[in-house]
Image (spheres, rainbow, N blue to C red):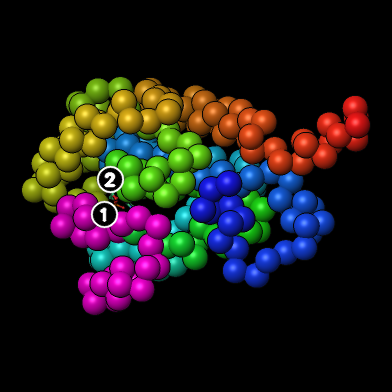
Amino acid sequence: MSALDGGVRPTPLAPMEIRSAFKRRGLLFVLSSPSGAGKSTIARMLLAEDDGIAMSVSATTRPPRPGEVDGEDYHFVSDERFTELVASGAFLEWATVFGNRYGTLKSEVTKTIEGGRDVLLDIDWQGTQQLKQVDPDIVRAFILPPSMEELERRLRHRGTDGEEVIQKRMDRAANEISHWAEYDYVLINNNAEKCRELVHNILKAERLKATRRVFLHDFVRGLIG
Ligand code: 5GP
């Protein structure tokens, strides 16, 4: 049993309740990619199509970009507040990216898992490594851009960042991509809809894994005694 699925639930449930509420062990599904590879679009499409999975909203010290909403895109916090959250053990993982800190809040993940849904995490390779230590059962998918030229084109097209930031993002993209082999699944995003479909297929197959379908023990006992 992982630290995230039942072992650390604050109020213990009676065995029958556990069985009915947790027919399947909740899944932590990590999506990583360099920014501009289309990860946010794919995540948005996946969430719209599958209501069995919800996004973990990270905390960050980065200022909001135009159009970003506090509590939806990120929990935007001050440096001081982030330090407090680290000290109080509020994070499952956190990392510094482009000089800003980003972290996955335990509360976000447990809220969703306890509600019987899977969790989608848009985090970088550093966070993925940490999360794998906390919960070896996570599923990790990496999205590659079709080419570095296309990645740069998408970053420019977004129009949210200045030239200097774009160059930094391109440098960091190469670094992020160098971690591709640490992931369970690696996809090339030639087409967002196709890529969304593949990500969804991965999610659906992972949900069917015998080790996650805890109710099967009882079900099969009912079948064959
Ligand atoms: P952006 O500033 O473009 O929204 O995100 C920059 C990078 O930070 C992305 O690669 C994103 O995956 C990563 N990131 C966002 N939230 C988290 C988090 O909670 N933890 C970690 N480790 N990385 C994150």
Q: Secondary structure at mark 1?
A: strand
Q: Along the horizontal axis of the image, is 43 left or right of 116? A: left
Q: Is residue 92 magenta?
A: yes
* Amino acid marked by disc 2: Gln
Q: Which residue is mark 2?
A: 126
Question: Which residue appears farthest toward the left when viewing the image?
Answer: 164
Quadrant for residue 32, please give it: top left
Residue depicted at x 44% and y 67%: 71
- Return the disc, 2 or 1, that comes first in the chain's sequence: 1
In the rendered view, tell whether residue 38 sits above or below residue 127.
Answer: above
Count of marks overlaid on the render: 2
Q: Which residue is mark 1?
A: 95
Residue 87, x across and y down, in percent:
30, 72
The region drawn magenta spans 78-102
* Amino acid marked by disc 1: Ala
Residue depicted at x 78% and y 37%: 217
Cβ atoms at labels 2 and 1 below 8 Å apart:
yes
Q: Is residue 198 magenta?
A: no
Which quadrant holds the C terminus? top right
In space, the residues marked 2 and 1 are separated at their CA atoms by 6 Å
- Whether ligand 1 has any atom under 8 Å from the Cβ at mark 2 is answered as yes
Q: Does residue 207 appear in this view?
A: yes
